Each structure stands twice: as C-alpha cells, then as structure tokens.
Amino acid sequence: MSPRQPASFAELFWQPIKQQKKTLTIVFIGAATLALTQASVVFIFGPVFKALFSLQDQSALQISDFLPASFNIQMRSYSPQEVFTALPLILALIATMRGLAMYVTQLYQERLSLEIADYFRCFAFSKIIRSTYLKIAEKSAAEWMSQVMNDVMFLQQRFSELLKSLVKDGLA
C-alpha cells in the first residue's frame, strides 16, 4: 500500500479485532456470565418470597416451588429451615461469581482497547515513516507525535465505549 492510499475500513477496524479473538471471546463470556448471575438473583428471589408467604400452608418446600410453572419437576422436599439456611450461601456464591465476571469483563475490555490502540499507533507510525520527506517536513516532530498520540487515544476511548455498548446491548 502506498503512503497516499487511504486505509480501508476492514484494515483499520476488523484487522485488529481479528487478532484479538481470544480476548473478545473472554469479554463476551464474562458479560454473559454477568447477565446470567443477575438473572439468577431475580429468578431466586421471586419464588422465595412466594414460598415465604405460603409457609403457613406447607411444612416442606419442593424444588418445583422455586421454578416457573413450565418446569414440571418432582424432587425431594426441603424444610423451610433448610431452604433459608442455604439461601444466603447461594446468594453469596452468585455475588462472588458476578463480581468475578465483572472484574474479568472490565479487565479484558480494557486489554482489548489497549491492544487495538497499539495496533492503531503502529499503523499510524508506519504510514508516517512511509511518507515522503516533504510531507514529513511540513510538521515538526512534536506535532507529528502529538497528532499520533492524541488521535490514537481518541480512537481508544471511542472503541472502549463502543465495545462496552456492544457487549451490554448485545446481551440485553
């Protein structure tokens, strides 16, 4: 590619993403885990409150009391004491999973943004180096560095925001 030829969208956007498939996969797995843990808290609390208010009618709780009506499962009965003893442990486990998933997702989102910024920085420097001397001499070295660094930082911030929006809206 000559220095005067503009870069294609695929070269600027898809190429760095293709190089980060593993990181992108971890981001989506982490975001999916985050969504599942949030849904599981809602899934648990609805039936728990239903079971709490119907304790006068029952001496034991079935697993089916905690599942939606579409699930038709008959299993062992649990005393309310067993259920309410296990409930804090289950919620603590879910909260731990949610925190870990949030940490991993944010960590790898930032890693992906930094890797892509590095790609853009190298791409911009290679374009400058392959330019003609007259084109390079039009600006001082400080102007070139400022332009490259600021443009890449701007792109990194926009990409980070785009990635967060895509992950959150993609799972919503």
Image (spheres, grey):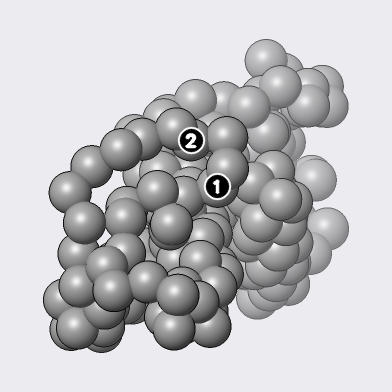
Q: Which residue is mark 2?
A: 71
Q: Secondary structure at mark 2?
A: loop
Q: Nearer the viewer, residue 157 or 22?
A: 22
Q: Secondary structure at mark 1?
A: loop
Residue type indicated by callout 2: Phe
Residue type indicated by callout 1: Pro
Q: Which residue is mark 1?
A: 68
- Residue 78 visible: yes
Q: Is residue 31 left or right of residue 14?
A: left
Q: Nearer the viewer, residue 60 or 4?
A: 60
Q: Pointer 2 and pointer 1: residues touching (CB < 8 Å)?
A: yes
Which of the 4 image quarters holds residue 11?
Answer: top right
Which residue is pictured at 63% across the width and 27% down the height? Answer: 14
Q: Is residue 107 left or right of residue 59?
A: right
Q: Is residue 11 left or right of residue 20?
A: right
Q: Nearer the viewer, residue 103 or 122?
A: 103
Position of residue 171 measured from the top left corner of the image (x, y, whole percent) = 64, 46
Find the distance from the CA under tag 2 to the CA under tag 1: 6 Å
Which residue is pictured at 45% across the width and 66% down the height? Answer: 44
